Image: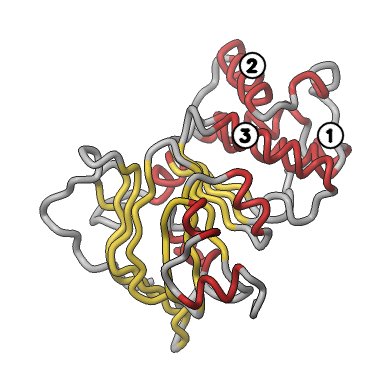
């Protein structure tokens, strides 16, 4: 992966109430440009929803925030991403440490073939936490935050693969929360779930907002309207518009946004 352009010398991220920000972010896969010149602020302890048709660059942008794209062969990134005023792609920055601060939950639940307890404890052990009582406390806290504790507390040693689809997704959320990230990225976290499980995930997002910043990619515009305070609309690799969710859905500034929201395309 080619290096990102060096960041500006000054930053106003913390003072302005932003947790993360991107400036002129462009991502290319070989000769194909996935996103181009994306500039956006991610506000602290706010849910930002990213909407747009399939293939418009939402997930590519999301993965750029914690450098998950680094693992894709042939990718090149230019522009600038900050976390608390610090360059995410700066010289000497360890992507693993970035991902510890900026966790991620994927579209399809991906529990490890381990016990429920060890699924949640995995990141803690990788981070070097070894005290059993401390690990157990953090696992319980994460499962409670993921609204899963009461359902699994009596079977922590059973395989995480034995849980229902909705429970597996909440287990993956608990795994991400165990290392106490400051930002949580969610890529279509409820797309494969039934309405009841989806409602639990949405309730969970609303509860977590008081503790951390959340960026969620969703094709479900009703879901974006329910869970987010700010919404960004992507189209053909561009960020067309971003603003308060109520404004984006009722008084969008751009014709493309209005056409998508009203169902004229997408």
Work out whether mark 1 precedes mark 2 in sequence or the reverse, and give the earlier one. 2
Work out whether mark 3 precedes mark 2 in sequence or the reverse, and give the earlier one. 3
The x and y percentages for residue 21 are 32, 53
Task: Pick the residue in front: 92 or 47.
Answer: 47
Residue 27: image quadrant is: bottom left
Q: Which mark is residue 159?
A: 1
Residue depicted at x 57% and y 76%: 259
The x and y percentages for residue 265 are 64, 80
Give how far apart the Cα atoms at labels 1 and 2 are: 17 Å
Mark 2 packing: few (<14 Cα in 10 Å), some, or many (20+)?
Answer: some
Give the residue at mark 3: 122
**Quarter placement of the N terminus:** bottom left
Task: Pick the residue in front: 136 or 233.
Answer: 233
Task: Pick the residue in front: 3 or 153.
Answer: 153
The x and y percentages for residue 118 are 70, 30
Give the vertical position of 206 relative to 58 (above or below).
above
Q: Which mark is residue 136?
A: 2
Residue 125: image quadrant is: top right
Residue at far bottom of view: 31
Residue 147: image quadrant is: top right
Q: Is residue 146 left or right of residue 94?
A: right
Q: Is residue 159 left or right of residue 149?
A: right
């Amino acid at each position: 992966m080619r290096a990102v352009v060096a960041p500006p010398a000054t930053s106003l991220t913390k003072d302005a109430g932003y947790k993360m920000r991107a400036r002129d972010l462009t991502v290319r896969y070989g000769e194909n440009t996935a996103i181009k010149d994306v500039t956006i602020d991610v506000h602290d302890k706010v849910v930002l929803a990213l909407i747009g048709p399939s293939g418009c660059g939402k997930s590519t942008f999301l993965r750029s925030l914690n450098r998950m794209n680094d693992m894709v062969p042939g990718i090149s990134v230019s522009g600038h991403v900050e976390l608390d005023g610090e360059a995410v792609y700066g010289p000497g920055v360890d992507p693993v440490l970035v991902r510890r601060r900026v966790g991620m939950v994927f579209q399809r639940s991906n529990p490890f073939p381990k016990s429920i307890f060890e699924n949640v404890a995995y990141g803690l052990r990788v981070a070097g936490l070894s005290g059993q009582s401390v690990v157990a406390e953090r696992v319980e806290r994460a499962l409670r935050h993921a609204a899963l504790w009461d359902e699994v507390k009596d079977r922590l040693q059973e395989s995480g693969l034995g849980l229902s689809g909705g429970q597996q997704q909440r287990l993956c959320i608990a795994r991400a929360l165990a290392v106490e990230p400051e930002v949580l990225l969610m890529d279509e976290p409820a797309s494969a779930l039934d309405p009841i499980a989806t409602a639990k995930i949405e309730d969970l997002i609303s509860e977590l907002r008081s503790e951390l910043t959340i960026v969620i990619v969703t094709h479900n515009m009703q879901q974006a309207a329910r869970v987010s305070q700010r919404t960004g609309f992507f189209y053909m690799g561009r960020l067309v518009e971003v603003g308060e969710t109520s404004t984006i859905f009722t008084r969008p500034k751009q014709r493309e946004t209005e056409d998508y929201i009203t169902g004229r395309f997408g």
